[in-house]
Every structure is written in C-alpha cells, then in structure tokens.
C-alpha cells in the first residue's frame, strides 16, 4: 500500500447495476490519473455491454493495479442479480 492507495474508495457491496456503472466511472478516473493501469485478461471498461446493449456476461470483473506499489483492486459484478463489489486484491 502507498499514499495513492490510501485514497482509493472501495465499495464493499453495491446492489444495483447503476452503482456498478458509477464504479466503472470511478475506475476510469483512477486510470486517467495515471497512477493505475488495467491488468491484462480483464474486461475493458467500455466492453461491458455488447452492440445490442446487453451485458457481455453474467459475471464481469475488472482488475486494476497501482503503478506505484503494485497493489491490485478488482471490481466484480454479477449483472444477472445486479450486485457486486470493488475490493482489494484480484
Ligand atoms: Zn499503491
């Protein structure tokens, strides 16, 4: 953990896809800040829905990593039930 990670806002539980979209916006901001990078083999933030507007999967996960200390954070969501979390780790 480092000073950058001290300020990250994790979400233990969100219960709607709306909050999931807000979480994606937040992750995008973290990436834009230049302090974090997406891990490969994780779903791109702009590919959560297909061309028809449906979720690409029932379970979607995005993992980002702090460039300073290497700590990983994962946003995982169950789009079918509409809940998820943004937590430390992979
Ligand atoms: Zn860090």
Image: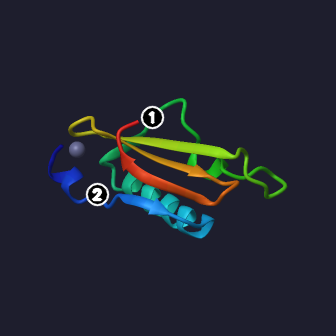
Outermost residue, right direction? 52
Quadrant the N terminus occupies:
top left
Outermost residue, front direction? 81
Q: State ligand 1's quadrant.
A: top left
* Residue 54 locus on image (x, y percent): 78, 55
Q: In this view, does 26 lie to the left or right of 69?
A: right
Q: Do the residues labelled 1 and 2 touch (CB within 8 Å)?
A: no
Which residue is identified by label 1? 39
Q: Residue 89 carries which label?
A: none
Q: Which residue is at a point 66% across and 57% down the rendered structure image?
A: 81
Kindly report the distance in space between the C-alpha atoms of the residues bearing marks 1 and 2: 17 Å
Residue 17 quadrant? bottom right
Q: Which of the two discs, 1 and 2, sits closer to the camera?
A: 2
Asked which secondary structure carries label 2, the reply is loop
Q: Which residue is at a point 30% across and 48% down the rendered structure image?
A: 35
Which residue is identified by label 2? 8
Q: Is residue 35 left or right of residue 64?
A: left
């Amino acid at each position: 953990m480092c000073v950058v990670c001290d300020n990250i806002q994790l979400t233990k539980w969100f219960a709607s896809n709306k909050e999931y979209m807000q979480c994606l916006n937040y992750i995008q901001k973290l990436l834009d800040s230049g302090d974090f990078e997406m891990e490969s083999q994780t779903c791109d933030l702009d590919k959560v829905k297909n061309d028809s507007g449906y979720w690409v999967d029932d379970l979607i996960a995005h993992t980002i990593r702090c460039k300073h200390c290497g700590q990983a954070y994962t946003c995982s969501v169950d789009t079918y039930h509409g809940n998820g979390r943004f937590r430390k780790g992979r």
